[in-house]
Image (cartoon, rainbow, N blue to C red):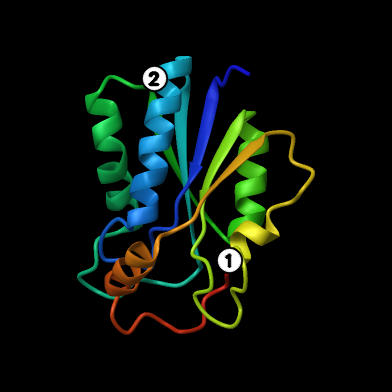
Amino acid sequence: MVYRKICVAVALQRYIDLPPVALRQRELARALAAAHGASIQVLSVNAPMPLLPDVETTEDKLQRFLAPLLDEGLEAHWSLREGRPSREIARYVQDIAADVLILGTHSKRGPFDVGLGSTAAAIPQDLALTVILIRPTEDEQERTRELMIPRYPFIFPYG
């Protein structure tokens, strides 16, 4: 199979810095794009709630996330949507006619995230594209917890 449009759906809003799983998603997208001559479309979905003052915006994080890809001369773009992540990801991959979706999981973050994580589990099964899930290692899970924005609201609309 030849991939022409690679979608990377990354969770960035809740974190001070780019989470380790997002960095692995970027590296896989980079390798696939280089091998297939594909473009990379990066999507992040914000929950409809403001961030705390003095925290880097999701737009800024997306630009930082894309910088190494652009520096390599790869075609890469980002989009930011608001709403329920699983719904917005499904709409986006259909809107851009993506061939592959690279999705990170957060795996057993809490009682609401048993197994894959609620967003990964809520992605519609009938999407006509390849879905690659990146699971965090134990070290990456710990690092991700450390990167969570302090005092970030506990209630977050996953899925």
Q: Is residue 54 above or below residue 8?
A: below
Which quarter shows the N terminus? top right
Residue 84 showing in the rendered view: no
The kind of secondary structure element at disc 1 is loop
Expressed as whole percent of the image width and height from the top left, the position of residue 41 reads 47, 34
Q: Residue type at mark 2: give it.
A: Ala
Q: Which mark is residue 101?
A: none
| 21 to the left or right of 150 | right
Residue drawn at (42%, 36%) of the image: 28
Expressed as whole percent of the image width and height from the top left, the position of residue 66 reads 31, 37
Q: Name the residue under label 2.
A: 34
Q: Which residue is at the front of the view, 53 or 74?
A: 74
Residue at the outermost right position: 126
* Residue 5 figure quarter: top right
| 76 to the left or right of 156 | left
- Few, some or many residues within 10 Å of mark 2 (<14, 14–19, 20+): some
| 117 to the left or right of 57 | right
The number of numbered badges drawn on the structure is 2
Q: Residue type at mark 1: give it.
A: Gly
Residue drawn at (38%, 22%) of the image: 75
Residue drawn at (28%, 27%) of the image: 70
Expressed as whole percent of the image width and height from the top left, the position of residue 42 reads 45, 40
Q: Mark 1 points at which residue?
A: 117
Residue 66 showing in the rendered view: yes
